[in-house]
């Protein structure tokens, strides 16, 4: 039984997309596995910054930064 070239091309593209998707999923879970063991995910870092032992040093103060001095509006001499 012959398969039409259009269907064959569609199946090949679908297979390639499936391989790429599977590869991305495996890489994502490997990243999560590694960083959760190292305690370096964003949620774990946030927990370290917001939950600290009362007798330990307090978390670092984050200075307030205003973007007002970063905006540069050129004036025209018209």
Image (cartoon, rainbow, N blue to C red):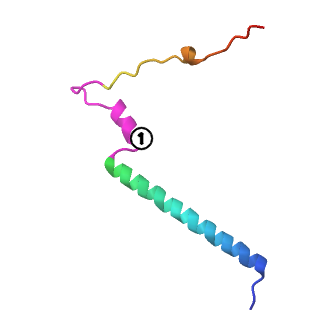
Q: Is residue 47 left or right of residue 9?
A: left
- Is 52 included in the stretch rendered in magenta? yes
Image coords of residue 18 (percent x, y)? 60, 67
- Check the picture and name the quadrant holding the N terminus: bottom right
Image coords of residue 57 (percent x, y)? 24, 25
- Count of marks placed on residues: 1
- Residue at point 36% right, 21% down? 61
Q: Is residue 64 left or right of residue 7?
A: left
- Is 23 included in the stretch rendered in magenta? no
Which residue, given by chain and number where applicable, does mark 1 sit on?
Answer: 43
Residue 13 vs residue 29, the one in the foreground = 13
Q: Secondary structure at mark 1?
A: helix
- Rendering quarter of residue 34: bottom left
Q: Residue furthest left?
A: 55
Image coords of residue 26 (percent x, y)? 47, 62
- Residue at point 37% right, 41% down? 44
* Up-down relation of residue 16 to residue 39 (above or below): below
Residue span colored magenta: 39-58
- Residue at point 69% right, 75% down? 11
Q: Is residue 4 left or right of residue 63?
A: right
- Residue at point 55% right, 14% down? 69
- Check the picture and name the quadrant holding the C terminus: top right
Residue 33 vs residue 52, the one in the foreground = 33
Image coords of residue 12 (percent x, y)? 67, 74
- Rendering quarter of residue 9: bottom right
């Amino acid at each position: 039984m012959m398969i039409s070239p259009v269907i064959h091309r569609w199946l090949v593209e679908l297979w390639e997309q499936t391989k790429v998707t599977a590869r991305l999923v495996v890489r994502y879970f490997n990243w999560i596995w590694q960083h959760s063991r190292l305690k370096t995910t964003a949620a774990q870092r946030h927990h370290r910054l917001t939950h600290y032992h009362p007798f330990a040093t307090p978390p670092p103060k984050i200075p307030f930064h205003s973007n007002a001095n970063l905006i540069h509006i050129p004036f025209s001499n018209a």
